[in-house]
Amino acid sequence: MKSLDKPGSAPTFDSVAEFFAQALAIEIEAWERYGELADQMETHNNHVIADIFRKMAHIEGMHRDEIKRRAGDALVGGRPASFSWLAPEGPEAIDLGDVHYKMTPRQALMLARHNEERATRYFEAIAEAATDPEIKAFAQIMAEDERHHVVLVDQWLDKFDPDDPDWAEDLDPPVISE
Ligand code: ZN
């Protein structure tokens, strides 16, 4: 498995099993992270955003199950893969270590968006580079789904003006002692 984030470096796989293992790792990471984000938004008393992340967790959980189903025996003996979410850089930057205490709903959505885009680019690169028709076709479907997730997150970001009191960034801020 080659680098995920270096532009122009398409990931390549030695086998279909390796591809499925990586795709599965991406979806498991997304499913886990969305669950965590939902929990964090609950602690912010932001149930609207928490519900969004629960829904995203559910969607990614279905992806995970779909990959398992498609991979079937191909996964058996395949090398286990890993994939970690990254924090966006720039003005929306957050430290993943601070997530539990300080993350605002907007930052949480930007984190989600960043990683949905990453997943999209990742699957697009696989689809482009794949010579195996099975991998190519499935990677195209996954890329399409992930693109749709970016749109979903964008719709939620658009729904709230950051200055809107309903945005509730500081509705019930956690006590931060430093
Ligand atoms: Zn996704």
Image (tube, helix red, strand yellow):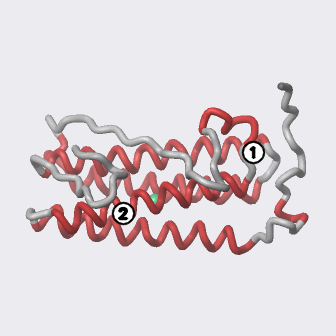
Few, some or many residues within 10 Å of mark 1 (<14, 14–19, 20+): some
Vertical order, 7 against 83 (above or below):
below
Residue 56, x across and y down, in percent:
55, 58
Residue 93, x across and y down, in percent:
63, 49
* Label 2 CB-ligand 1 distance < 8 A: no
- Image side of residue 38 versus residue 9, left or right: right
Amino acid found under the numbered disc labelled 2:
Arg
Helix, strand or loop for disc 2: helix
The residue at the point 69 percent across, 36 percent down is: 100
The residue at the point 47 percent across, 72 percent down is: 148
- Image side of residue 125 versus residue 136, left or right: right
The residue at the point 77 percent across, 40 percent down is: 43
Residue 6, x across and y down, in percent:
33, 52
Residue mark closest to the camera, 1 vs 2 = 2
Mark earlier in primary sequence (1, 2): 1
Q: Quadrant of residue 178?
A: top right
Q: Which residue is mark 1?
A: 42
The residue at the point 90 percent across, 64 percent down is: 165
Amino acid found under the numbered disc labelled 1:
Glu
- Which is more toward the observer, 141 or 11? 11
Q: Which mark is residue 121?
A: 2
Q: Residue furthest top?
A: 178
Few, some or many residues within 10 Å of mark 2 (<14, 14–19, 20+): some
Residue 172, x across and y down, in percent:
89, 45
